[in-house]
Amino acid sequence: MVLLHKLHQLGFTSTVPVITIDTLHLFPETYEFIGKFKSSSSSFEQEQQRELQETTAEQAPPPETTWFPLPLLTVYQPKGYSSKDAFDKEYGSDLYKTNPEKYAYLSKVEPTLRALQEHGAKMWITGRRQSQGGERANLAILEVDDTDGGGDDDDDDDGDGPKNGQQEQQQRQQQPRRLKLNPLAHWSYEDVWNYLREHHVPYNPLYDRGYKSIGDTMTTTPVDGDADERSGRFVGMDSSECGLHSTWDKIQKMQEELAAEEEREAKAAAEAAAAVFKDANNNNNNNNNNNNNNNNNNNNNNNNNNNNNNNNNNNNNNNNSNSNTQGAAAKAPPLKPKNQKRELPCVNCLDLDPDSLVNILGNKNDELGKKDVLIEFYSPHCGHCVIFAPIYNQVALEIQEQHSEFIQVARYDTSSRKIPQSVKDAGLTIKGTPTLFYLQRQEQDPEEGQKSDGQKTDVTWKAAKFEGNRSKENIMKWIQSIRASASSAEAKSAST
């Protein structure tokens, strides 16, 4: 709302298109709020006055709230759907849980890309901020839009699918890249609310009910006043982004998986139809055989002819069935060549899976010895992770050369593995990628006289999360400060 109010103040709302995405799963309050801005300039003030008169004094917004029209506001919905019931009937009401990537693509990514393409956008403006954390922590004010991947922009279902391979790469290089402007990148949460209050800008009433960040009803919950801004989004889903700002690689992966799923469904439907057709043919053949057996011996020649004809018909029917199956499958969207998983370099890194991560926290990994562990939670499809990969590799190299006796560098791919609940319970909360944790090993010997033969030293892990600019220098200083604090504490404990 800060950006929209700024556009209104500058007189740009009549020339700059404003788009919003309706996933069909928004809160009723959100739909009502959007509706207030869809009124035309000529009738806006009259409609607002009428609504205020019809609303009781207790329900009416504060009299100083300054409403303003957005005549170029356009609402985009999932392609081919205009109601939640229709969308859920086609894909299931729990798609956001069973296949969150597919849900994000259908309800958010595709409508956003369509909107940008239809408006011929050379640059779009967003309200993202570094203070929102997660993947936005290192957000720049101006960036090249990584959702601008080129490919097939035709809006017809010709079955050709997006162009791929070298042709697609050449097309992307030839196209001017779209830019993304984030004017509020350095604003804090308090800065936003100070502006809204100072200028009496209207806002979604859900903010007054404990919602600090608002999206779909299924993935948005109210939080305490001192909680992180986006902590109420995607709770328990190992995600902090809604999908609107996905990188091109991730969008392409979504498109490939959707095309593959559609092809599987088309093949299954074709095979089912072929099976029904084959059963019908078999029943007809059985009836013909029974009739032939009941004929007199004098009709043997006719029976033989009939049987030959039936066999020929069977062959023809089988050929037709095969042709039908091939024809139905041919109409399915062709499966694009699968992207090979991007390999992000990391020298001497320990690639963790759920079991090995749990074993570390449970002190069941004897290979670590007495080392601390530096862990990066990342995804090879995350644009920020790709940018950060060379830096983390430099960190790994320096640790290998100077601190390998004390520190093990590790990483965990969140795109292909869920994070175990026991890991979250241990304090490793992942709100976005990349995220760094330093697990500090803390040993505590049993009290004198209580240690039995063969009893292991008690070990606990203290987790520290890295915050700030992810440079090699900052990360190494952070690690050194943790180890220095630990050494100081040990020395103080020994002296007492």
Image: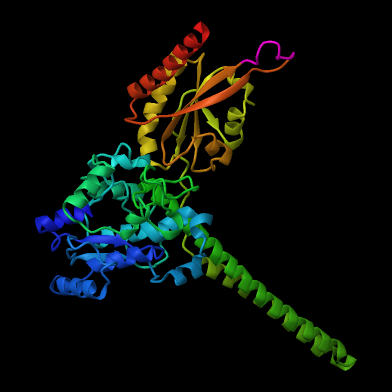
Q: Residue furthest right?
A: 297
Q: Seen in the image, is 125 located left or right of residue 162?
A: left
Q: Is residue 315 visible?
A: no
Q: Nearer the viewer, residue 339 or 461?
A: 461
- Relative placement, left or right, of 173 versus 272 is left
Rendered residue at 49%/35% (across/down): 428
Which residue is pictured at 43% across the width and 16% down the height?
485
The image quadrant of residue 302 is bottom right
Q: Nearer the viewer, residue 324 or 148?
A: 148
The x and y percentages for residue 263 are: 52, 62
Q: Main secondary structure of the magenta part?
A: loop
Residue 229 in picture, x, y percent from top left: 35, 45
Q: Position of residue 126 (x, y in %)?
A: 25, 50
Which quarter of the rendering shows the N terminus? Answer: bottom left
The magenta-colored residue range is: 445-453
For residue 131: magenta? Answer: no
Q: Nearer the viewer, residue 396 or 153?
A: 396
Residue 5, relative to residue 158: is it above or below?
A: above
